[in-house]
Amino acid sequence: MFKSVNTTSLLLALLLLCLSMGPKLRAETGDAVTVVDADGHKVEIADRSRIVSLGGPVTEIVCALGYADNIVATDISSTWPESLEKLPKVGYWRALATEGILSFNPTLIIISDLAGPEYIFDQLRATGIPVLRVPEEFDIPGAKHKITLLAAALNRKTRGDALISTLDRDLAHARELLKDATTRQKALMLYLRGAKVLNAGGANTPIDFMLNWCMADNVAHDIDGWKPVGAEAIIGRSPDVLVLTTSGLASVGGAEGLLNIPGIAQTPAGQNANFVVMDDLLLLGFGPRLGKAMIELVRGLHYGDAEADR
């Protein structure tokens, strides 16, 4: 049960509105399907006219499947395609509020299983609105599973198959590039949010899989997950290359600001200004652009900017 009278009233009002609009909307959006989500729940989906999509990778797939115009709200991690910028945001996907999501009168809620807090899933399901919780798995089969699940939920199997075919083609291109890679770089991924927030990507992170796949050694593999690191730890790991997100590098004032962070300039990567900088969602999203991300990462790790068009 919800603790406040105001919350209960809001939920009841939204439920009544959903029920009153349901038949008309369902008639406009195609056949009903039943899919099994990340929690093993059978989710019946008949109305896709008003989607709230939460989690950048999930939202990217929904758009790639042709449903961008049906999304009425997203979270701030949903940054691709750029057209999403004009949509209302319900906050950050790991700190969501049930009332904020329901205020957009969704007919379908699609949400990453990494979103939170955890209790909102039960609250959202209690409204009777279909809630599809999508698993985040940081490997190639996991990326394909997300696409396949969402394609089934949105009645877009043909388009989903096409996305996977493109993904496979891009991965094959990345493998061809790797054939000419003669050394394994020592790489460190730093997730930056200003000069005082430096988190290294260790084992069980998206970047750990990607670096290994791209024939690079993750010097933070001894760390589990994302953990803060200081100057001593950065210097001690002696990376040949630093991998960064575009927004992270911008948050410290670019390359010049990065080199002013204690420890960075003392590494081989800092001394040679050897930085691979990629869009946040492209690098860490494990969505339909995973193959393109691998191509870009291989080029950055093994060929440098001079051969970016190889």
Image (tube, rainbow, N blue to C red):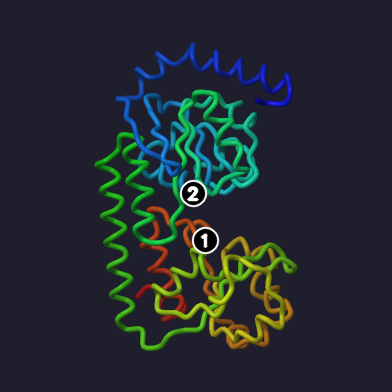
The tag on residue 136 is none
Left or right of 161? Residue 36 is right
Which image quarter holds the C terminus? bottom left
At horizontal 40% and vertical 24% (from top left) the residue drawn is 47
Q: What amino acid type should be assigned to the residue bearing mark 1?
A: Asp
Work out whether 17 lies above or below 29. Answer: above
Q: Residues within 10 Å of mark 2 (few under 14, many from 20)?
A: some
Residue drawn where x is 65% and y is 19% of the image: 10
Tell me how far mark 1 sits from mark 2, CA to CA. 10 Å
Q: Residue 279 bears which disc, if any?
A: 1
The secondary structure type at the circle numbered 2 is loop
**Does the rendering let one see residue 306?**
no
Q: Quadrant of residue 37?
A: top left
Please provide percent x and percent y for residue 28. Answer: 35, 20
- Quarter of the image holding residue 166? bottom left
Task: Find numbered disc 1 in the image and state the secondary structure of the residue it sits on.
Answer: loop
The residue located at (62%, 83%) in the rendering is 270
Q: Which residue is mark 2?
A: 80
Q: Is the Cβ of the residue at disc 1 closer than 8 Å to that at disc 2? A: yes
Query: Which residue is found at the position 41% from the left and 53% from the top?
Result: 287
Residue 192 pos. (x, y %): 65, 65
Which quadrant holds the N terminus?
Answer: top right
